[in-house]
Amino acid sequence: MLELRLVQGSLLKKVLEAIKDLVNDANFDCSSTGFSLQAMDSSHVALVALLLRSEGFEHYRCDRNISMGMNLNNMSKMLKCAGNDDIITIKADDGSDTVTFMFESPTQDKIADFEMKLMDIDSEHLGIPEAEYHAIVRMPSSEFARICKDLSSIGDTVVISVSKEGVKFSTRGDIGTANIVCRQNTTVDKPEEATVIEMNEPVSLTFALRYMNSFTKATPLSSSVTISLSNELPVVVEYKIAEMGYIRFYLAPKIEEDEDETKPQV
Amino acid sequence: MGIKGLTKLLADNAPKAMKEQKFESFFGRKIAIDASMSIYQFLIVVGRSGAEMLTNEAGEVTSHLQGMFSRTIRLLESGLKPVYVFDGKPPDLKKQELSKRFTKRADASEDLAEAMESGNKEDIEKFSKRTVKVTKQHNDDCKRLLRLMGVPVVEAPSEAEAQCASLCKSGKVYAVASEDMDSLTFGAPRFLRHLMDPSSRKIPVMEFEVAKVLEELNLTMDQFIDLCILSGCDYCDSIRGIGGLTALKLIRQHSSIENILENINKERYQIPDDWPYQEARRLFKEPLVFKEEEQLEIKWTAPDEEGLITFLVNENGFNSDRVTKAIEKIKAAKNKSSQGRLESFFKPAANPSAPAPTKRKESKCVLRTFKPAIQHKMSSVHLFNWSRPMVNGNLSLPIIDLASKHSVPLSRGVSFGA
């Protein structure tokens, strides 16, 4: 038996909007500690990890761990039927092949039940090792979204480099080049408007803008975004979900073609 | 061609072994392609209507060049690294099959002539397809073209599929692309179908994994080979009345052709008198291929622009603008840095999600214990406890020590943050 009641229903709607373009089908895993998801895009370049801790739900009941395979597009279709201030409850019976989303209007005068078929998804689960990052940039999420959008009108890849000067986003395309530098800025009214750069070592990595743009769909979830970079690792773009958890996107960097020194194929 | 009815048999009995993939998702992968099969496809598909073929001024067919050129560029543009493998001398056992094909083609030629006389368009279409034959000239043209394009060519000592499978087994390529299901029987770990189909047809690439095939069918590789021989392969006849499904049943019951022969009802099934199934099996298990150490190094090089123009434009009447543009595309594709994959950084961990609905009931999720652990670690330890000293101390030595002390012994699943 599973019953998760989320007062701030719009949050779940936003989560779905953030990931449904990246991943088609995914398993939502429920345990006593929280509601989580890990999924890769079809080409295995990007990964999304979502966690909504049980404490963030008004009511959280999960008798045993269950994993529910859902088509995210269909799930999003159903969640779109919920009002923005509706309370959403996710329900599933043990062994059932459906999940129910219940939407209650804030005044309790309307209750809608949407039942969705679950699916079996054979997905690979990656163990994400503990890592220390060479540089961690925290900046307003809208600013990051703007940068990615602007750069993608010029080129398809972005080079993100962090140095003493700040963090630089640059691209190059047929029509020319673009460079955007953001400096550390903590003298702001609200803490979420700050740009904080913590650098341990300078880094410079290249990424496909297509994916970055898809990550920025999570912007409505959080006013700031944290970008963690290491020269040998995929970048982590994290949006914190207030009092509940986070949504993290991992993206494998582009690798300069070294003369046929390809790594063993996995 | 290939193994009779194997695709359907697998679709029905081992659906998990087949995965639809997007063409683009193979970027950066080295793929061995069965060239003869592709050339054959090009001859049928590219620029042919009825008995008319795409030709150069001298009247020589150029469909295969056009097809090979544009399709290979499409592969390169998507970041794939194709290796074309050409057939060598066919094994003796295949001669029978080949002579059968030869007669069929001869029949078709006659039928075609008849159809042309009567002007029946459908028939012309049907029979002219059947008369298509890949000649040595076609093969040589394509080899020359590919070398000029900087794409590696391997000339197999015998069957191309076998060589492809061996390249794949030794890890030189990621997968084998062919339309011929033989590749699985030769043990290619990963096998792709429809990779070379025209993009306009929008057919997703079908990926087969031999390990999963065996797992799903619950057979060993030897049994699978026997299954393929029983279903009907290029090397010997099959037993009348035994198709894929019966063959699967028999193999599951008796586990090898020898045992089946002992137990089968000989009245009902007529076993061919001269049935070289053992040799066929040997061909599948130990085909004539380059040994690993003999295998030439496979390298992708820059295209030879002048060579391509001479060959395609001057000798074969291709449009020079188009060829120049295409060469630009090849060069652009070469310069692109390749996209990394997450698997090269993160290793697959035990899958927490229960795959089948039956399992969903008692869904025990092994990973549950460790997943939150990692998640806590990453956020709390890293971003918070950690980041401060990094900034302030501007990387003083003790901090680095702390880092290595913590991160090194930490294999996944161990939590210190939580």
Image (tube, rainbow, N blue to C red):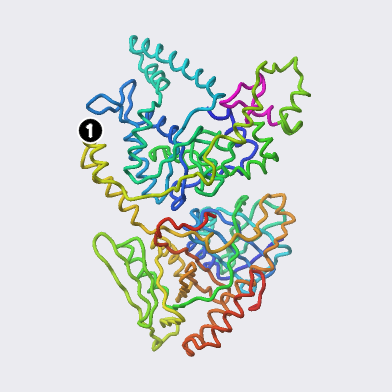
Give the residue pinned by disc 1: B317
Percent x, y for residue B319? 22, 37
- Direction from residue A265 to residue B121 in the image, left or right: left
Q: Is residue B233 magenta?
A: yes
Which quadrant is home to the C terminus of chain B?
bottom right
**Where is residue A58, by image quadrant?**
bottom right
User: The disc labelled 1 sits on which kind of residue?
Assistant: Gly
Task: Give the letter of the chain under mark 1.
Answer: B
Viewer-closest of A80 and B316: B316
Residue at 66 percent of width and 35 percent of height: B224
B202 relative to A246, above or below? above
Residue at 29 percent of width and 28 percent of height: B54
Percent x, y for residue A67? 65, 58
Crowd band around label 1 with a 10 angstrom C-alpha radius: few (<14), some (14–19), many (20+): some
Q: Is residue A82 magenta?
A: no
Residue lying at the far right of the rendered structure: B263
Asked which secondary structure carries label 1, the reply is loop
- Direction from residue B119 to residue B108 in the image, left or right: right
**Where is residue B151, by image quadrant?**
top left
Viewer-closest of B103 and B287: B287
The total number of labels drawn is 1
- Direction from residue B312 to residue B50 in the image, left or right: right
Magenta residues (range): B228-248
Residue at 62 percent of width and 28 percent of height: B280
- Direction from residue B35 to residue A70 in the image, left or right: right
B58 relative to A261, above or below? above
B199 relative to A244, above or below? above
Percent x, y for residue B10? 61, 36
